[in-house]
Amino acid sequence: MRLIGRWGARLGATAVVAAAGLAVTALPASAAPGVDLAVSVQSGVVAAGSDGKPFVVKVTNVGDADSDGFAFVLDVSGLDLKKVTIELPEGTDKACGKQGGKIACEIVNVLVPNDSAEFPVEVKPVSGRGGLGPAGSFKAMVSNDKDTNKSNDSTTVKVSVAKPGVDIVVWAGDVVAGRDEATGKVERVKPDGSAELSFAVFNFGSVASKGIEFVVQLPEHVQFTAGLEGCTTSSDKRRLTCTLTDFLFEPGDRGIGADVPVKVASNAPESVDLKGSIVGKSLGVAEALGADARRAAPQAPGWLKTRNNADDVDAGDNTDEFVVFVGAVDGGLPVTGPKALAIGGVGAVVFAVGVVLLVAARRRRVVLVTPAE
């Protein structure tokens, strides 16, 4: 498959080694008894001068029984609105109720153990007058009458505005055979069956970066059945490494990604949940040359120079984990090959910021119900 598009800055060697050596196996069998919903948020920092980015609030069922829905509440009353603004994406917000500093949604997703639902919360720095530093906090909460553990039902996210810079964000969807259209419940991939892994990479910062490297690691019993042009696959076909050192990745809400076919081994354990990961990090920041430098080096490609070893303004969202849901033996979901989407004449899958909502709608479906008046 061709993987060409709007690319960001390269992964540092430390991140590559860490991802390559990551032990990715089955999720623990000793889950909490009954339904146990847990809330987590990776992001907490947004770059000054940027258009903002989605802070993904993830609700995961870490129990051993299916959850038949839940209420989701976002309390934003603790934010410093002089520095940042916050809102749910268009469409999602219309299905939720708002009162004061709180946003409440009723979710009818059926979450099997280890499944999750994701809510992209758009946080934007206030341009011109907001300033850097702490910007208050927001709180995300879930509730379900059958939840047996209330200690992980909420999380408070401290928000801050960092100096302008690169902000690489990665996302990966769970690997499933499908999802129920009405409830979003997982349909498992059978041993010897095939499915697709979807992933995406963004630069939500305020500075362009040059070159990118990221690593996708599959769990044991799962292999890639096709590669990506410009990338390498490990001998065991479980690790995909993509390195593009010269591509200029502009900041904004357009990222790159792909749907890559994978296969579950015929001898894989039945009815297990296997965990994989994607890791990415910026390597170089592309800076415009001044007028004198342009005259001195007129042949410089794009009038750019590269500052190596770039710091990412928020490393907390440079890693994402996904789950391969394996079922019992009984056929599988055929996959014809990798998919690509041509945008602007470039052979690639290029996502807008709605990837967290649009792709997640296929992989981690969020079913919203308009609240009663």
Image (spheres, helix red, strand yellow):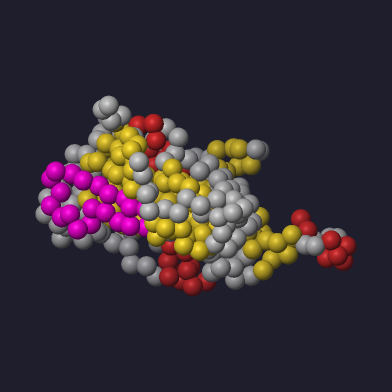
* Point 48% across, 40% down: residue: 354
Residue 58's x, y, as percent?
33, 50
Residue 23's x, y, as percent?
33, 67
* Point 48% across, 68% down: residue: 16
Please identify the quadrant where the C terminus is shown: top left
Left or right of 207 in this view: 194: left
Quick check: can you spot residue 193? no
Residue 62's x, y, as percent?
21, 54
Q: Quadrant of residue 287?
A: bottom right
Name the residue nearer the viewer: 275 or 156. Answer: 156
User: Residue 348: within the magenta?
Assistant: no
User: Residue 155: within the magenta?
Assistant: yes
Question: Eyeballing the image, is 341 above or below 43?
Answer: above
Residue projecting furthest to the right: 295
Left or right of 84 in this view: 309: right
Residue 154's x, y, as percent?
26, 54
Question: Eyeballing the image, is 140 above or below 109?
Answer: below
Name the residue nearer the viewer: 237 or 11. Answer: 11
Which stretch appears magenta?
A: 138-157
* Point 22% across, 39% down: residue: 69
Number of marks drawn? 0
Question: Eyeballing the image, is 340 above or below 125?
Answer: above
Quick check: can you spot residue 156? yes
